[in-house]
Image (cartoon, grey):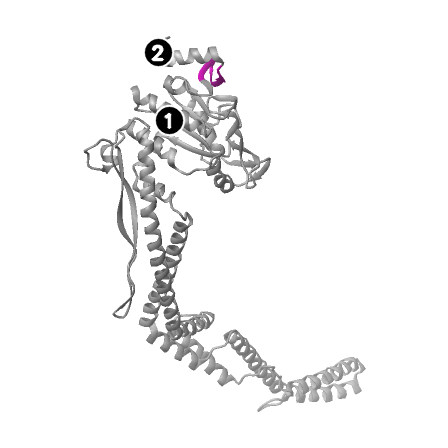
Amino acid sequence: MLEYLRIRGLALIDDMELEFGSGMNALTGETGAGKSFILKAISFVLGDKLSTDMVRPGRDKAQVEALFTRRGEQGEEEEIVLRRELSASSGRSHFFLNGALTSQDTVRALRPSLLFHVSQHGQQKLLQPAYQAALIDSFLADPELVQRKDALIRELKDVAAQRRRLLDRMDVLSEKRELLEMQQREIEKVAPEEGEEERLEQARTELRSGERLRVQYEQGLGLMLGGEGPGIAAQLGELERLLASLANDDESFAPALEALRDFQEESRELARRFRTTPSTNCEYDADELESRLYELAQLKRRLRRSIPEILALQDEIRENLSFLDACGLDLHRLEKQERELAKKLHAILEECNAQRREAASRFCTALEGELAGLGFDERVHVEPESVPVEVWPQVMDKVKVICPACMEERWRLLWAPNPGMRPQPLDKIASGGELSRFLLAVVGVQPTAEDAALIFDEVDAGVGGVTLNRVAERLHDLASRRQLLLITHWPQLASKAAQHFRVNKEVRGDETFTLCHPLDEAGRAAELKRMAGDE
């Protein structure tokens, strides 16, 4: 039951507070006064989308608060306070449940137990076979049967999709198997290792550097010792003897002789160093190294990949070939799982179809009783019609049928509002007024939460005369058991309401406001008179 509603900053509504009572609550007013904004606000706080252009100009956000009461699991009465805010700048909205931030999914899950909205849009849904089938399903002895059936179909589709993906991959890899095995042989023949090419290139650089250094040592030793002619060491000896002789006659040569003798010692040390072959830490033989690098280069050229890519390809090839060798078991497992699920689906569909036949009969019988009380002939007839639909093909094992095709009976409603008529689909023969009453009859028999408020948005469209009085009586009878929020333009219906609200527009300066006020007896009499056209 919806007890309290506050709307702020929504469209033409600046700040509106409404307190609803049990029974029928009628909202009336001229067309365009803003009654639809109130319904939009209720739908908004219960999870429907609202665009930012619905935020009142000059406001930074629209806010709707609602207080619902319902019967708890232990039979106690509990209050549910919902609030939702819509930001004009960002377009984002936030939900609050009993003062705490919550999610849209949580609020939408609560909605069926709080509100049931019947509108002219509902008439169009009523023409859809899928909606008619859902109405019949609401009368199933085991309501969870459809959920189990749908879950089985989803699981079966998932297993079948896995099997198809497996077969597709098997087909692709089977065509490539010869190429994969050839590539595997080439890779295994060369057997590249991770980082090997870099290590070999580094070793080649070290070997080349060592060879260059050895040649330079030999050149240095040749200069020191000489080849065909005397080397630097011999020439320095001759120069020393010459300077010694000169120094005996001229002491000014003594310093030069001393310096030469020091240099001779350094040159002898240099010659000793040149005699020592420079060592390298390279562990590779030069010929073997070049041969290995050539092998790797040829492998890269043939496979058109780098060594890291070849190593990754090797892993991929091993995985694919292993997959081809082992996929037979996976395929067998999936086929077995699909057969078992198909058998389960067939069994649950048999049960579901049987329950639906019974539910369709009970629903149509109950609906005929409701329609007879809404101005239709007492012999009005509603007949369920089923169309068998294959939801899963038969499962074969070679030539043997393991499981027959899984057939589901999809139901729709046919009706004959007058005696002697052949039952036909609603969309073929129902007028707008007949659909309004038909929808009201559906609400009357449909099992919904007893505490959920019923909103009727001009469900009386297309109805008039004596029939309108019958509709008013039916709504009044329904209001004795449930809370109703009724938007109507007919005084016959509004007069049955326990609470009556008047919706009107008011212009103040350059601004327009939608207002809603509860009416006292005098105000109510005046409003009913206006609705009847007696002003």
> Does residue 464 appear in the picture of this structure?
no
Q: Which residue is mark 2?
A: 533
Quick check: is 161 in the magenta stretch?
no
**At which x and y percent is residue 306?**
44, 70
Secondary structure, mark 2, is loop
Q: Position of residue 356 (x, y in %)?
A: 33, 47
Q: Say how many tags the image has.
A: 2
Task: Look at label 2 and name its amino acid.
Answer: Gly
Q: Main secondary structure of the magenta part?
A: strand
**Relative vertical location of residue 364 with respect to residue 405 in this rendering, above or below:** above
Is 79 rendered above or below residue 337?
Answer: above
Image-quadrant location for residue 328: bottom left
The amino acid marked with disc number 1 is: Arg
Q: Secondary structure at mark 1?
A: helix
What segment carries the magenta color? 503-519
Mark 1 highlights which residue?
Answer: 474
Q: Which quadrant is the C terminus positioned in?
A: top left
